[in-house]
């Protein structure tokens, strides 16, 4: 299992300070919408300058028509990032067009599909998607797998189920991880590091429990010890 720390802080300076504190760790760093809209490709360059071995996950969760998604995928890949994601609900044609475009590149990034956001509870998910989280996640994961993607973003609670419905090598990246005594924030379906490991999660994403701590390095080390 690997750890991915979310760089969700309000300024580029704070994100880079966090990255500097974690610079000796073999981890992923996640650049999300807020940071990327604000700081753009300079942030990617600055992170790689702190440690070129940091793996960068660009979490923009793209959703659009197939050609626009493929164009965006190519632009993201050209930033030198290591992984990005799309919404599985964009459909198989769109996901295939992304993978086809990347297949022309020498070292394409990994591509994951978002299944159900971990902030959804069953009731609100049903209103939008008209089905239970479990059923829809199974279908989205299968769609992503059949479209040639490398894995999915899902909650810990669906990780093992997805692997049994696709392939053990199909990556599951799971946000919504909390240590004991942590605040749940807006996450609804949270799990411990141990539970993530039991459910065969490949990469766990941790944001607030790390970056709101007075000692982020200590929290990261604590998490890594449990992985
Ligand atoms: O602070 P916290 O640990 O809740 O951060 C989780 C991170 O993972 C956030 O950056 C959030 O946008 C992201 N994420 C998520 N649920 C998903 C996909 C991404 O929480 N399904």
Image (tube, grey):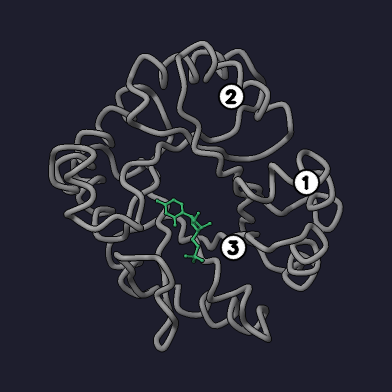
Q: Nearer the viewer, mark 2 or mark 1?
A: 1
Q: Secondary structure at mark 2?
A: helix
Number of residues whose C-alpha sits closer than 10 Å to that of mark 3, classed few (under 14), some (14–19) or many (20 or more): many
Quadrant position of residue 221 = bottom right
* Mark sitting earlier along the chain (2/1): 1
Q: Quadrant of the C terminus?
A: bottom left
What residue sits right under mark 2 in the picture?
73
Q: Quadrant of residue 1?
A: bottom left
- Real-space Cα distance between discs 3 and 2? 22 Å
**Residue 131: image location, x then y, percent:** 13, 40
Q: Are marks 2 and 1 in contact (CB under 8 Å)?
A: no
Q: Which residue is mark 3?
A: 5
Given residues 22 and 166, the one toward you in this image is: 22
Q: Which of 213/108 is in front? A: 213
| Residue 121 screen position, x and y as percent | 24, 58
Foreground pick, 225 / 195: 195
Q: At which x and y percent is residue 96?
A: 41, 17
x%, y% of residue 29? 64, 56
Q: Crowdedness of circle 2 by 10 Å Cα count: few (<14), some, many (20+)?
A: many
Is the residue at mark 2 in contact range of ligand 1, meaning its CB lies under 8 Å from it?
no
Among numbered discs 3 and 2, the one appearing first in the sequence: 3
Q: Quadrant of residue 171?
A: top left
Give me the C-alpha separation between circle 2 and circle 1.
19 Å
- Which residue in the protein does label 1 denote? 39
Residue at 72% of width from left, 26% of height from top?
78
Q: Is residue 65 left or right of residue 73?
A: left
- Label 3 sits on a secondary structure element that is strand
Mark 1 or 3: the one toward you:
1
């Amino acid at each position: 299992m690997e750890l991915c720390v979310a760089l969700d802080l309000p300024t580029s300076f704070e994100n880079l300070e966090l990255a500097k504190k974690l610079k000796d760790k073999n981890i992923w760093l996640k650049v999300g919408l807020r940071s990327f809209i604000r700081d753009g490709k300079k942030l990617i360059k600055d992170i790689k300058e702190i440690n070129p071995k940091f793996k960068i996950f660009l979490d923009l969760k793209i959703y659009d028509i197939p050609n626009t998604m493929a164009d965006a995928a190519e632009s993201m890949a050209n930033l030198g990032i290591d992984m990005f994601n799309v919404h599985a609900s964009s459909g198989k044609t769109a996901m295939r067009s992304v993978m086809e475009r990347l297949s022309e590149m020498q070292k394409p990034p990994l591509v994951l599909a978002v299944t159900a956001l971990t902030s959804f509870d069953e009731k609100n998910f049903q209103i939008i998607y008209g089905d239970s989280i479990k059923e829809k996640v199974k279908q989205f994961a299968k769609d992503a797998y059949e479209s040639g993607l490398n894995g999915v973003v899902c909650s810990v609670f669906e990780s093992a189920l997805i692997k049994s419905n696709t392939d053990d090598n199909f990556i599951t990246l799971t946000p919504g991880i909390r240590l004991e005594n942590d605040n749940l924030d807006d996450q609804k379906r949270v799990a411990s590091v141990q539970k993530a490991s039991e459910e065969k999660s490949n990469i766990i994403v941790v944001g607030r429990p790390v970056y709101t701590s007075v000692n982020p390095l200590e929290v990261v080390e604590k998490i890594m010890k449990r992985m």
